[in-house]
Amino acid sequence: MACAFKEPDRVPTDCSSHCGMMNREFEKLSRHFGINNPKYDTNLVGMVDVFDERVWQKFPIDVRTIWMGKPDNFKKT
């Protein structure tokens, strides 16, 4: 609604890839919701930058980050 310049029923929320959560904390949060072995990816400093959608569905978050993926020859150091 907000993107269409119409009044939404609430203020849209976004936590996407910039919420500042470390991988261990994301795993704890996932377990809290009964989600074992969550799917996620981390950046170079260990912060989660791709979140398991099953965790996000537990929150009223309206915005999702869309990642194109890494090149086939990407090597994490």
Image (cartoon, helix red, strand yellow):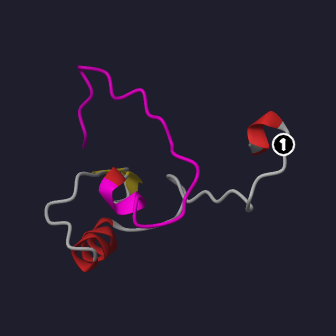
Q: Nearer the viewer, residue 43 or 19?
A: 19
Q: Which residues are magenta?
A: 54-77
Horizontally, residue 28 falls left or right of residue 12, namely left
Quadrant of image for the N terminus: top right
Three-letter code for the amino acid on which mark 1 is drawn: Lys
Q: Nearer the viewer, residue 59 or 75?
A: 59
Q: Is residue 17 visible?
A: yes
Q: Quick check: is 63 in the magenta stretch?
A: yes
Vertical side of 64 occupied by 58: above or below: below
Instruction: State the residue at coordinates (27%, 74%).
Output: 33
Vertical side of 25 occupied by 55: above or below: above
Residue 46: x and y in percent read: 34, 60
- Magenta segment's dominant SS is loop
Residue found at the far top of this picture: 72
Q: Quick check: is 9 in the magenta stretch?
A: no
Quadrant of image for the C terminus: top left
Vertical side of 42 occupied by 19: above or below: below
Residue 24: x and y in percent read: 27, 72
Residue at the spot of label 1: 6
Task: Count every numbered label the image shows and give the total.
Answer: 1
Q: Image quadrant of residue 70?
A: top left
